Every structure is written in C-alpha cells, then in structure tokens.
Image (tube, rainbow, N blue to C red):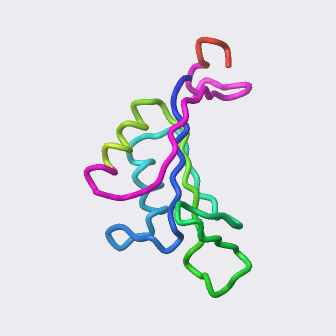
Amino acid sequence: MQGAFLRFYVREDHRHHGQLAWEWLLEHGSSLGLQGGCAVKSMAGFGHRHVFHDAGFSELTGTRIIEVQFVTAQAGARKLLDLLHREKLRLFYAYIPASFGVVNPDDADPPAAADGS
C-alpha cells in the first residue's frame, strides 16, 4: 500500500485535555482507523532550542521526548492532522511518504502495493 509514515515528538509530561499527549495521539489514531501506531521513549536528544535531554539525568524527569509514530494510508494521515488542527494541539511532526505491507500476508491483511512491495 502507499501511504504515510507520521512521526510526532512530544515531551513525556505534555498533556492534552488532562491526558498524556502521546496516549491521546495513540487513542485517536486508533479511533480514526489508522493501520498502526506506537510510542517510543527516547534515550537522549535535543530540539529546536538545542537543550540536550538525557535519560541519565534524573533531575530532568518529565522532559524526555516520546516519539509517536503511525503508518497509515494518506487519508488516515490527513484525518489525524486535521484533528490536531481542530484541537489546536501544537506538536512537531514529520510526514514521510511510505510503501508498506505484510510479508507472507493472510486473507485479513490489506492488499500489497501495486509495485509488489
């Protein structure tokens, strides 16, 4: 299938409507029917302010970054981005065109991309 790889970067303590933002993203991505998503806690990194965050510094609890990623059809990516605009949720993200599928699919899996990938 042709689609998108969406990746969002949120602080682990970032909340939206009282819920952790990474949980909110996964919940809403699932409810919108996106094909798959996950959240991964970073070990270290920096953002646009060039402040270094490292898992080893206990005084920075709550400042580490959670990467929330989705693989989905382009329509699903658009639905999620439209929802984020309506919710006025400010997040940094990457949108990467992607081909995806299942190796050795069964009848429950989506059809393969036209190019065989």
Q: Nearer the viewer, residue 14 or 48?
A: 48
In the rendered image, the vertical position of residue 83 relative to residue 106, given as above or below: below
Task: Let me know if residue 91 is in the magenta part.
Answer: yes
Query: Could you tell me which residue is drawn at 56 percent across and 25 percent down?
Result: 110
* Residue visible at 53% across and 44% down in the picture: 70
* 83 lies left or right of 13: left
Front residue of 106 and 75: 75
Can you say which quadrant of the picture contains the C terminus?
A: top right
Q: Is residue 105 above or below residue 39?
A: above
Q: Left or right of 21: which side holds 104?
A: right
Q: Is residue 99 magenta?
A: yes
Image coordinates for residue 37, horizontal then vertical, percent: 55, 48
Q: Position of residue 21 (x, y in %)?
A: 44, 64
User: Up-down: is 70 above or below 60?
Assistant: above
| Residue range highlighted in magenta | 84-111
* Image quarter (top left, top right, bottom left or bottom right) of the N terminus: top right
Please provide percent x and percent y for residue 39: 58, 57
Q: Is residue 6 left or right of residue 86?
A: right
Q: Residue furthest front?
A: 50
Residue 116, image x, y percentages: 67, 14
Taking the spot 42% from the left edge, 61% from the top edge, the residue there is 24
